[in-house]
Amino acid sequence: MDAGEASVIGARVRMIRRRRGLSLVVVAGLTGITKQYLSALELGKRGFNRRGLVEDLANALGCSVADLTGQPDLAPDRASAEALATLPEIGMALSDVTLDDVPDVPARPIEQLARLVAQATDHLDQTRYALSGRGLGMVLIELQVHVVTGDTETRQRALATFVEACRVAMSTAKFLGQHTIAVLAGRRGYDAAQRLGDPALIGFGAYIRSNALMNSGAARGRVTHLLTANIETLAEKADPTVPDPSTAEAYGLLHTYAALDAARAHRAADARDHLREADAIARRTGERNTMALHFGPTDMALASLAIAVELGDGPAAYDRLTAHPINVEALGSANRLATLHIDSARALAQAQGTRDADTIRHLDRADRIAPVLVRNDPWARELVVVLDRRARRRVWELDSLCNRFGLGRPGSTRR
């Protein structure tokens, strides 16, 4: 890279940093360099002698490498590629090994496997998919070994842990667009929950399976039947006042997803009925977080927005939500915070262009929080294309989103 190119990139770094409202100290710290070195780069006094430095700066600034270099970046998103690389092993573990037929391999102690699954769940909640999927295939196999060979107590704990591991596998695959693996993980988790016979886990398993099926494009009737059957099964057992209200928590989650399922089928009255039931449960259980699913009053507010978007009432629902702000950050979940911004963008996009500046702002914020989640979300990708097509003038933030989503030269989709 010659001095002229370095100077141009440095100027872009400075422009984007200032546009983001970030200080030299903050960006330098996020990049792993000194403030003095960053200043020299911005002023063209130092060269960008390695591609990794440009990538690190792009990550710190929440932009694309192409935003800094001005050239299309044809390499796949590194974080997505690393996450995708974990899925073949997971798929093999779920398809080649069953709860009745396991290989003759040593299994680590159940306590250690449970800790690994808990860590994977946390990585999933923070949208670190390369970490949530890493080694999960072998963990799934070893849990099934314990189910077959362990004593009664070990088998029960292994089944419960296996359900949670399947939740991690399902969501990791789903968020990366690998729906076949997601559906397989959902089915295996549901089967394990039924074998254990615990009402709460059966509810969580049904939620996991319906989540996978809905996002795979499966026939809507299958999802509706699965949700309805399990809601009926748990109805008499879902007491939110007991010391451990996990069954009520699972029951509320099923109603939440049934509301979304109904909204997607344009059954508005059913959607609102399910949402009211879920909200009533959430108010009594309070904030819960089994398997990092975050059921509670805060998530009900988020669900209300998502369901309103499906019913075409996005802008009004967004205004209602912002009139009574909720503290989503208190959940400590990058997934939920990014999802709020994605759904806010989808809601405002329904205003037919009159609120596109805020739509872009929410998409940009979501991408900076959870880039792998957002860039692999087909609805978010389509929304960027729609925004680009109807944009009346060049906006840097929109051009940057096009670059980050790999949608080609900014403005190329405009008519």
Image: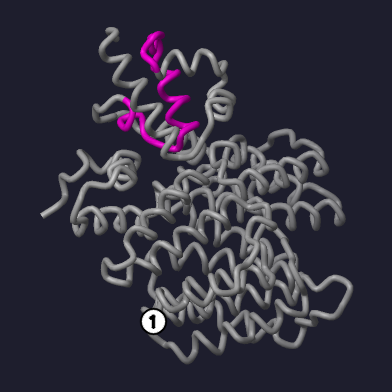
Q: Is residue 165 magenta?
A: no
Identify residue for label 1: 265
What is the count of numbered marks? 1
Please give the range of residues in magenta: 43-68
| Above-or-below relation of 211 to 102 | below
* Position of residue 274 measured from the top left corner of the image (x, y, whole percent): 57, 85
| Above-or-below relation of 50 to 319 | above
**Residue 54 image-quadrant placement:** top left
Residue name at image x 43 percent, y 80 percent:
263
Q: Name which residue type carries label 1.
A: Ala
Left or right, 411 with reference to 158: left
As helix, strand or loop, the secondary structure at mark 1 comes to loop
**Residue most extreme to the left:** 415
Left or right, 302 with reference to 281: left
Image quadrant occupied by the N terminus? top left
Residue name at image x 53 percent, y 79 percent:
258
* Position of residue 306 measured from the top left corner of the image (x, y, whole percent): 48, 71
* Position of residue 364 measured from the top left corner of the image (x, y, whole percent): 42, 49
Q: How is the image coloured?
A: one colour
Image quadrant occupied by the C terminus? bottom left
| Above-or-below relation of 46 to 156 | above
**Residue 338 makes an appearance in the image:** yes
| Above-or-below relation of 256 to 154 | below
Residue situated in front as seen by the camera: 67 or 217: 67
**Residue 88 makes an appearance in the image:** no
**Residue most extreme to the bottom:** 269
Residue name at image x 23 percent, y 53 percent:
388
Left or right, 353 with reference to 10: left
Residue name at image x 69 percent, y 48 percent:
144
Q: Residues within 10 Å of mark 1 (few under 14, many from 20)?
A: some
**Residue 219 image-quadrant placement:** bottom left
